[in-house]
Image (cartoon, rainbow, N blue to C red):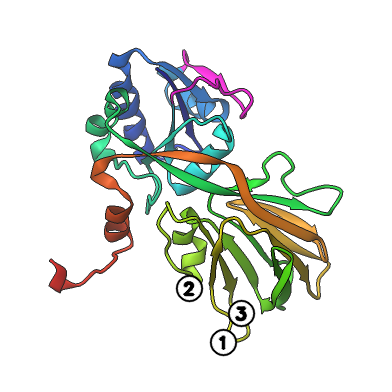
Amino acid sequence: MKIAIYGQQIQPNTERILEKVFTTLAPYTSEISVEKNYFELLIAQNPVYCNYKTFSNASDLNPNTTVLISIGGDGTILRAATFVKDKNIPILGINAGRLGFLATIPEENIETWLPKIYTKEYKISSRSLLELSTDAPEQPHQNINFALNEISVTRKDTTSMITIDTYLDGEYLTSYWADGLIVATPTGSTGYSLSCGGPVLTPEVNSLVITPIAPHNLNARPLVIPDTTDVMLKVSGREDNYWVSLDARMASVNNQTTLHIKKAPFQIQLIEFIEEGFLKTIRKKLLWGEDKRNS
Protein backbone atom coordinates (compact mmCIF):
# COMPACT_ATOMS: atom_id res chain seq x y z
CA MET A 1 0.00 0.00 0.00
CA LYS A 2 1.04 3.54 -0.72
CA ILE A 3 0.23 5.91 2.16
CA ALA A 4 0.45 9.72 1.99
CA ILE A 5 0.53 11.84 5.15
CA TYR A 6 -0.48 15.49 5.47
CA GLY A 7 -0.57 17.92 8.38
CA GLN A 8 -0.21 21.64 8.98
CA GLN A 9 1.47 22.04 12.36
CA ILE A 10 3.04 20.09 15.18
CA GLN A 11 1.85 20.72 18.72
CA PRO A 12 2.81 18.88 21.93
CA ASN A 13 -0.04 16.38 21.56
CA THR A 14 0.78 15.89 17.87
CA GLU A 15 4.16 14.36 18.75
CA ARG A 16 2.44 11.47 20.55
CA ILE A 17 0.00 11.04 17.68
CA LEU A 18 2.79 10.97 15.10
CA GLU A 19 4.68 8.34 17.04
CA LYS A 20 1.57 6.15 17.21
CA VAL A 21 0.80 6.61 13.51
CA PHE A 22 4.27 5.76 12.21
CA THR A 23 4.72 2.91 14.72
CA THR A 24 1.38 1.42 13.70
CA LEU A 25 2.15 1.68 9.98
CA ALA A 26 5.69 0.26 10.25
CA PRO A 27 4.86 -3.50 10.44
CA TYR A 28 2.87 -3.30 7.22
CA THR A 29 5.90 -2.07 5.21
CA SER A 30 3.88 0.62 3.49
CA GLU A 31 5.41 3.04 1.02
CA ILE A 32 4.97 6.30 2.92
CA SER A 33 5.24 9.83 1.54
CA VAL A 34 4.82 13.07 3.48
CA GLU A 35 3.75 16.51 2.27
CA LYS A 36 6.92 18.56 1.93
CA ASN A 37 6.18 21.40 4.37
CA TYR A 38 4.94 18.94 6.98
CA PHE A 39 7.99 16.76 6.33
CA GLU A 40 10.27 19.68 7.20
CA LEU A 41 8.38 20.18 10.46
CA LEU A 42 8.75 16.48 11.23
CA ILE A 43 12.49 16.24 10.72
CA ALA A 44 13.03 19.46 12.67
CA GLN A 45 11.21 17.76 15.53
CA ASN A 46 12.82 14.33 15.11
CA PRO A 47 15.39 13.31 12.42
CA VAL A 48 14.05 9.75 12.50
CA TYR A 49 11.48 10.82 9.89
CA CYS A 50 14.10 11.97 7.35
CA ASN A 51 13.92 8.89 5.09
CA TYR A 52 10.39 9.34 3.81
CA LYS A 53 9.50 10.51 0.30
CA THR A 54 7.75 13.85 -0.12
CA PHE A 55 5.11 15.48 -2.32
CA SER A 56 4.48 19.21 -2.75
CA ASN A 57 1.15 19.63 -4.54
CA ALA A 58 -1.73 17.77 -6.14
CA SER A 59 0.14 16.95 -9.35
CA ASP A 60 3.10 15.74 -7.29
CA LEU A 61 1.03 13.27 -5.26
CA ASN A 62 1.24 9.71 -6.61
CA PRO A 63 -2.15 8.97 -8.25
CA ASN A 64 -1.78 5.36 -7.07
CA THR A 65 -1.78 6.42 -3.42
CA THR A 66 -4.08 4.12 -1.46
CA VAL A 67 -4.96 6.46 1.41
CA LEU A 68 -4.08 10.03 2.41
CA ILE A 69 -3.88 10.34 6.19
CA SER A 70 -4.69 13.81 7.49
CA ILE A 71 -3.30 14.60 10.95
CA GLY A 72 -4.96 17.60 12.54
CA GLY A 73 -8.46 18.96 12.82
CA ASP A 74 -11.27 19.44 10.32
CA GLY A 75 -9.45 22.39 8.75
CA THR A 76 -6.55 20.08 7.93
CA ILE A 77 -8.89 17.72 6.09
CA LEU A 78 -10.24 20.66 4.07
CA ARG A 79 -6.66 21.43 3.04
CA ALA A 80 -5.94 17.75 2.38
CA ALA A 81 -8.81 17.71 -0.10
CA THR A 82 -6.89 20.14 -2.32
CA PHE A 83 -4.19 17.49 -2.78
CA VAL A 84 -6.40 14.55 -3.76
CA LYS A 85 -8.83 16.56 -5.94
CA ASP A 86 -10.33 14.16 -8.50
CA LYS A 87 -7.80 11.35 -8.00
CA ASN A 88 -10.30 9.25 -6.04
CA ILE A 89 -7.84 8.85 -3.16
CA PRO A 90 -9.72 8.42 0.14
CA ILE A 91 -8.84 10.63 3.11
CA LEU A 92 -8.53 9.29 6.65
CA GLY A 93 -8.67 11.95 9.37
CA ILE A 94 -6.79 11.54 12.65
CA ASN A 95 -7.96 14.14 15.13
CA ALA A 96 -5.25 16.30 16.64
CA GLY A 97 -7.50 19.35 16.84
CA ARG A 98 -10.55 20.22 18.92
CA LEU A 99 -13.97 19.12 17.68
CA GLY A 100 -12.83 16.70 14.99
CA PHE A 101 -16.14 16.33 13.17
CA LEU A 102 -14.48 15.11 9.96
CA ALA A 103 -11.25 13.92 11.55
CA THR A 104 -12.91 11.17 13.51
CA ILE A 105 -10.06 8.94 14.79
CA PRO A 106 -9.11 10.05 18.32
CA GLU A 107 -5.60 9.53 19.63
CA GLU A 108 -6.60 6.64 21.90
CA ASN A 109 -7.95 4.60 18.95
CA ILE A 110 -5.09 5.03 16.47
CA GLU A 111 -3.43 1.69 17.22
CA THR A 112 -6.66 -0.32 16.96
CA TRP A 113 -8.42 1.51 14.09
CA LEU A 114 -5.54 2.43 11.77
CA PRO A 115 -4.68 -1.21 10.85
CA LYS A 116 -8.20 -1.54 9.49
CA ILE A 117 -7.17 0.31 6.34
CA TYR A 118 -5.16 -2.80 5.44
CA THR A 119 -8.01 -5.22 6.10
CA LYS A 120 -10.53 -2.83 4.47
CA GLU A 121 -12.75 -2.79 7.54
CA TYR A 122 -14.21 0.58 6.73
CA LYS A 123 -16.70 2.25 4.43
CA ILE A 124 -16.29 5.15 2.03
CA SER A 125 -18.39 8.27 2.49
CA SER A 126 -18.54 10.19 -0.79
CA ARG A 127 -18.76 13.95 -0.27
CA SER A 128 -19.83 16.46 -2.90
CA LEU A 129 -17.93 19.70 -3.47
CA LEU A 130 -18.70 23.16 -4.82
CA GLU A 131 -16.96 24.74 -7.78
CA LEU A 132 -16.52 28.50 -8.26
CA SER A 133 -16.08 30.55 -11.42
CA THR A 134 -16.40 34.28 -12.01
CA ASP A 135 -16.81 36.70 -14.89
CA ALA A 136 -13.60 38.46 -13.83
CA PRO A 137 -10.41 38.09 -15.91
CA GLU A 138 -8.65 36.63 -12.89
CA GLN A 139 -10.60 34.19 -10.78
CA PRO A 140 -9.96 33.89 -7.05
CA HIS A 141 -8.02 30.71 -6.33
CA GLN A 142 -7.42 29.90 -9.98
CA ASN A 143 -5.70 26.64 -9.00
CA ILE A 144 -8.01 25.80 -6.10
CA ASN A 145 -11.51 26.80 -7.17
CA PHE A 146 -13.50 24.22 -5.25
CA ALA A 147 -14.66 23.78 -1.66
CA LEU A 148 -15.66 20.77 0.42
CA ASN A 149 -17.56 22.72 3.09
CA GLU A 150 -18.81 25.98 1.67
CA ILE A 151 -18.29 29.00 -0.53
CA SER A 152 -19.16 32.22 1.25
CA VAL A 153 -19.16 35.94 0.50
CA THR A 154 -18.68 38.42 3.35
CA ARG A 155 -18.15 42.15 3.81
CA LYS A 156 -14.61 43.55 3.82
CA ASP A 157 -13.10 46.65 5.48
CA THR A 158 -16.48 47.91 6.60
CA THR A 159 -19.14 47.47 9.27
CA SER A 160 -21.85 48.15 6.67
CA MET A 161 -23.95 45.40 5.19
CA ILE A 162 -23.50 44.13 1.68
CA THR A 163 -26.25 43.26 -0.79
CA ILE A 164 -26.14 39.85 -2.43
CA ASP A 165 -28.42 39.49 -5.47
CA THR A 166 -29.07 35.75 -5.71
CA TYR A 167 -30.21 33.77 -8.76
CA LEU A 168 -31.02 30.05 -8.99
CA ASP A 169 -30.68 28.52 -12.47
CA GLY A 170 -30.91 32.04 -13.85
CA GLU A 171 -34.11 32.94 -11.99
CA TYR A 172 -33.99 35.75 -9.44
CA LEU A 173 -34.47 34.54 -5.85
CA THR A 174 -33.93 37.61 -3.67
CA SER A 175 -31.42 40.24 -2.58
CA TYR A 176 -29.96 39.53 0.85
CA TRP A 177 -29.01 42.57 2.93
CA ALA A 178 -26.58 40.95 5.34
CA ASP A 179 -23.00 40.56 6.51
CA GLY A 180 -22.67 37.80 3.92
CA LEU A 181 -24.05 34.62 2.42
CA ILE A 182 -23.01 30.95 2.62
CA VAL A 183 -23.57 28.26 0.02
CA ALA A 184 -22.81 24.97 1.79
CA THR A 185 -22.59 21.30 0.87
CA PRO A 186 -24.06 18.59 3.13
CA THR A 187 -20.55 18.25 4.62
CA GLY A 188 -20.45 21.99 5.27
CA SER A 189 -23.95 22.02 6.76
CA THR A 190 -22.41 21.17 10.16
CA GLY A 191 -19.88 24.02 9.94
CA TYR A 192 -20.24 27.75 9.27
CA SER A 193 -23.79 27.34 7.97
CA LEU A 194 -24.89 25.61 11.18
CA SER A 195 -23.40 28.46 13.24
CA CYS A 196 -25.61 30.87 11.26
CA GLY A 197 -28.79 28.88 11.85
CA GLY A 198 -28.70 26.53 8.87
CA PRO A 199 -30.03 22.94 8.95
CA VAL A 200 -27.95 19.78 9.30
CA LEU A 201 -27.91 17.60 6.18
CA THR A 202 -26.74 14.00 6.12
CA PRO A 203 -23.79 13.46 3.75
CA GLU A 204 -25.84 11.41 1.25
CA VAL A 205 -28.41 14.16 0.60
CA ASN A 206 -28.24 15.61 -2.93
CA SER A 207 -28.78 19.17 -1.75
CA LEU A 208 -27.08 22.46 -0.98
CA VAL A 209 -27.92 25.04 1.69
CA ILE A 210 -28.03 28.81 1.17
CA THR A 211 -27.63 30.52 4.56
CA PRO A 212 -27.53 34.31 5.10
CA ILE A 213 -25.07 35.70 7.66
CA ALA A 214 -26.73 38.17 10.06
CA PRO A 215 -29.46 39.24 7.61
CA HIS A 216 -31.20 42.55 8.28
CA ASN A 217 -34.70 41.16 7.75
CA LEU A 218 -36.47 38.60 9.87
CA ASN A 219 -37.95 36.66 6.94
CA ALA A 220 -34.56 35.74 5.45
CA ARG A 221 -34.18 32.07 6.26
CA PRO A 222 -31.81 29.29 5.17
CA LEU A 223 -32.93 27.58 1.98
CA VAL A 224 -32.28 23.98 0.89
CA ILE A 225 -31.94 23.54 -2.88
CA PRO A 226 -31.09 20.62 -5.22
CA ASP A 227 -27.37 20.23 -5.76
CA THR A 228 -27.97 20.41 -9.52
CA THR A 229 -28.77 24.12 -9.14
CA ASP A 230 -26.49 26.76 -10.62
CA VAL A 231 -26.21 29.58 -8.08
CA MET A 232 -25.27 33.06 -9.31
CA LEU A 233 -24.36 35.86 -6.89
CA LYS A 234 -23.85 39.58 -7.55
CA VAL A 235 -22.49 41.50 -4.58
CA SER A 236 -22.56 45.26 -4.00
CA GLY A 237 -21.81 47.51 -1.04
CA ARG A 238 -20.21 50.72 0.14
CA GLU A 239 -16.69 49.37 -0.23
CA ASP A 240 -15.04 48.46 -3.53
CA ASN A 241 -14.27 44.85 -2.55
CA TYR A 242 -15.65 41.93 -0.60
CA TRP A 243 -14.31 38.57 0.57
CA VAL A 244 -14.91 35.27 -1.17
CA SER A 245 -14.01 32.21 0.92
CA LEU A 246 -13.60 28.65 -0.29
CA ASP A 247 -13.48 26.71 2.96
CA ALA A 248 -10.52 28.40 4.73
CA ARG A 249 -9.04 30.03 1.61
CA MET A 250 -9.93 33.67 0.96
CA ALA A 251 -9.65 36.16 -1.89
CA SER A 252 -10.64 39.79 -2.30
CA VAL A 253 -13.07 40.37 -5.17
CA ASN A 254 -14.30 43.58 -6.77
CA ASN A 255 -17.88 44.69 -6.31
CA GLN A 256 -20.27 43.65 -9.08
CA THR A 257 -18.11 40.62 -9.94
CA THR A 258 -20.54 37.84 -10.77
CA LEU A 259 -19.93 34.54 -8.97
CA HIS A 260 -21.12 31.24 -10.42
CA ILE A 261 -21.35 28.35 -7.96
CA LYS A 262 -22.26 24.79 -8.87
CA LYS A 263 -21.61 21.23 -7.80
CA ALA A 264 -18.12 20.06 -8.76
CA PRO A 265 -17.85 17.18 -11.28
CA PHE A 266 -16.05 14.94 -8.77
CA GLN A 267 -16.36 13.91 -5.11
CA ILE A 268 -14.00 13.55 -2.16
CA GLN A 269 -13.90 10.15 -0.46
CA LEU A 270 -13.69 10.05 3.34
CA ILE A 271 -12.94 6.85 5.25
CA GLU A 272 -15.40 6.04 8.03
CA PHE A 273 -15.19 3.24 10.57
CA ILE A 274 -18.31 1.54 11.87
CA GLU A 275 -17.38 2.70 15.38
CA GLU A 276 -17.68 6.39 14.38
CA GLY A 277 -20.27 7.04 11.64
CA PHE A 278 -22.06 10.31 10.89
CA LEU A 279 -25.02 9.74 13.21
CA LYS A 280 -22.78 8.73 16.10
CA THR A 281 -20.63 11.78 15.45
CA ILE A 282 -23.47 14.30 15.61
CA ARG A 283 -24.72 12.71 18.85
CA LYS A 284 -21.27 12.68 20.40
CA LYS A 285 -19.71 15.92 19.15
CA LEU A 286 -22.72 18.15 18.52
CA LEU A 287 -24.57 16.77 21.55
CA TRP A 288 -27.53 15.92 19.32
CA GLY A 289 -30.54 15.04 21.43
CA GLU A 290 -28.59 15.61 24.65
CA ASP A 291 -31.18 14.93 27.32
CA LYS A 292 -30.79 13.09 30.61
CA ARG A 293 -33.95 11.16 29.73
CA ASN A 294 -32.07 9.58 26.77
CA SER A 295 -29.41 7.99 28.97
Q: Is residue 292 left or right of residue 268?
A: left
The amino acid type of the residue labelled 3 equals Pro
Give the mark nearer the N terminus: 1 vs 2: 2
Q: Residue at x 58, y 81 (%)?
A: 220
Residue ranking furthest to the bottom:
218
For residue 117: magenta?
Answer: no
Q: Residue at x 65, y 56 (%)?
A: 245
Residue underneath mark 1: 218
- The tally of labels here is 3
- Determine which quarter of the picture holds residue 279: bottom left
Q: Kindly report the distance in space between the C-alpha atoms of the residues bearing marks 2 and 3.
A: 11 Å
Q: Is residue 134 left or right of residue 44?
A: right
Mark 2 touches mark 3? (CB < 8 Å):
no
The amino acid type of the residue labelled 2 equals Gly
**Neighbours of disc 3 within 10 Å: few (<14), some (14-19), many (20+):** many
* 60 is higher (above) or lower (below) than 279: above
Looking at the rendered image, the quarter that the N terminus falls into is top left
For residue 59: magenta?
Answer: yes
The amino acid type of the residue labelled 1 equals Leu
Q: Provide the major secondary structure of the magenta segment.
A: loop
Residue underneath mark 3: 215
Question: Residue 219 in the image: x percent, y percent?
Answer: 57, 85
- Extent of the magenta region: 50-66
Residue underneath mark 2: 197
Q: Kindly report the distance in space between the C-alpha atoms of the residues bearing marks 1 and 2.
A: 13 Å
Give the mark nearer the N terminus: 2 vs 3: 2
